[in-house]
Image (tube, rainbow, N blue to C red):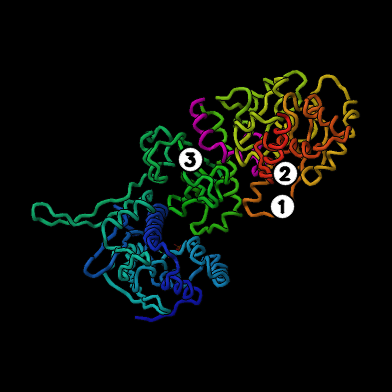
Amino acid sequence: METLEFQAEARQLLQLMVHSIYSNKDIFLRELISNASDALDKVRLAAFTDKDLQADTDDLRIELEADKDQRTLTIRDNGIGMSRAEVIDLIGTIAKSGTAELLRKLKESKENSADLIGQFGVGFYSSFMVADKVTLVTRKAGETEGTKWESEGEGTYTIDSVEDAPQGTSVTLHLKPEDKEDHLFDYTAEFKLREIVRRYSDFITWPVRLKVTKTVDDETTTEFETINSMKALWARSKDEATEDEFKEFYRHISHDWTDPLEIIQMQAEGTFEYQALLFIPSHAPMDLFMRESKRGPQLYVKRVFIMDECEALMPEYLRFVKGVVDAQDLSLNVSREILQQDRQIQLMRRRLVKKILQTIKAMDESKYETFWREFGAAVKEGLVNDFDNRTSILEISAFASTHDPEKPTSLADYVSRMKEGQEHIYYLTGASRSIIENSPHLEAFKAKDYEVLILTDAVDEMWVSSVPEFDGKQFQSVAKGQVDLSDDADEDRSKDFEDLLTWMTEALKDNVKEVRLSSRLTTSPACIVGDANDVTPTLEKMYRAMGQELPPIKRILELNPDHALVTSLRTAHSENKEGAAETAELLYGIALLAEGGELADAPRFTRLLADRLAQTL
Ligand code: ADP
């Protein structure tokens, strides 16, 4: 028997495991089963390629055996095994690329070290999160002598030769005491082992068999029961699996008990092989709009579960899509950081996104209606962020409009209804449909029977300023910029109002940057509009709610030259009548209220209004 020292990096990583900074300790089993599964793959391949190899490939399997009295758990495989030299080399040192990098990062950042290590895929050493001693016995296929390795994880390990070791590897964990607060569970408990295997290793293609004891009629028997389903559903074609199996699988990964709206299967072959099985749920999760909500499919590499929520594979605006992606050519030890930059991952992500968008486009009307109601507001974020797919996203988007109060419209339908002479796609953003519908800005558009999109989602404020056009038609806010809808081009009218406008601009200079005449209005006396690049009131509110400092935003007050209040005010001003300034102020307040805005000084407004009204009676 020899006592050897771990290599320096291995020792550091072990220390992290022993003092277990990682909260999810259950994953040790995933790691050991994954190693066992690899070992089975390898022996199968070795026996296949080397006919002279004395390897036993009958009944390849993984066994779990717990001993409650001894408090041990053994994970056993009859795979390729390791020679003595390999044990020293593979278990005593860490050859993984990225280890040094990981350890350096861990040193630098104390806080999220748990995350970092979790992303790394810690392998065999994760045993030391749950065990204070680990015994590994292995015999390489085709060799006669076995090797026993043992360590308490503290810097040294012993290595010895053993006879009669079966082919393959068994890892016996001498379990630490249960400590639920520290996420250390009873890993001798049948239900716990079943749960972990179901969660992490269900789709391992080898049987995972748990030794169970059964008592029937006072007779106790033990047997090995297969506890994983071994079904890699994503690798099967749609005809090879039933709809119910897909739904069952969806439930399993999503914990959503309603059926998915769409099941999407992808199988890519060739230089870069992967399979994907994705689901669009039929309802939005509670946290769809919470910051930092989780996203992305589960990532498997060659049937081995790597991580939940692989965000590198899914853009944020498709965060509701669930599923599995199984890549053939990725390393099992990929970290989240590496994934973000991996070219294959980026390529996969592009294909997944395209496929999802195509699927949405192909939905029938009732499915699409559900889809858009549940996820539309999230999808629209893609208009801001996903430049490459902007057109596709516009094509699958629907918007409320003045055309039909019941049903949102596609942009293509909007365009098909555009009137002679109408150049733009008009929209108005605001807090609610009723506020927008009653907004004075819409008056002239209604009069001309121009359709206006009614945009009430927070994200609408964002995309309208970043998406220039659809089908060659520009998006144009009815509350921004100059709108010329007047049929008779009477330019001279502003001349008649010049004095009034100059005076009012000065009188209201704390609130607006300009007062001008409007061609937007037919019945209201006034409205407030922004310049093309001005922040809208809704956006302003959003920014302030997020704690952003903004300078006060002044917009433009537009007057209706045909309204009695405006013409009378002109007269009052030209005659230097008392109260003209107050009326001007009231006019501004009215315009603000009409668009659903808030008065800066409501008590003053009501007092002025009451005074005015009193004088009219
Ligand atoms: P990883 O599996 O991520 O490479 P591990 O630390 O878990 O890292 O294992 C290191 C190496 O030890 C493996 O790559 C494999 O060669 C060997 N090994 C681990 N477990 C087994 C096993 N059950 N059978 C055969 N070889 C194993």
Q: Which residue is mark 1?
A: 550
Label placed on residue 338: none
**Tag 2 and tag 1, C-beta contact below 8 Å:** yes
Q: CA distance from mark 2 to mark 1?
A: 10 Å
Q: Which residues are magenta?
A: 364-393
* Looking at the image, residue 421 lies above or below residue 514: above
Q: Give me the residue at 79% from left, 31% from top.
A: 559
* Looking at the image, residue 9 lies above or below residue 365: below
Q: Which residue is mark 3?
A: 284
Q: Nearer the viewer, mark 3 or mark 1?
A: 1
Q: CA distance from mark 3 to mark 1?
A: 33 Å
Where's residue 186, x and y in %?
Answer: 29, 63
Q: Quadrant of residue 568?
A: top right
Q: Which residue is mark 2?
A: 535
Q: Quadrant of the N terminus?
A: bottom left
Q: In terms of secondary structure, what is the magenta stretch mainly?
A: helix
Where's residue 199, x and y in %?
Answer: 37, 52
**Tag 3 and tag 2, C-beta contact below 8 Å:** no
Q: Is residue 22 left or right of residue 420?
A: left
Which one is earlier in the sequence, the residue at label 3 or at label 1?
A: 3
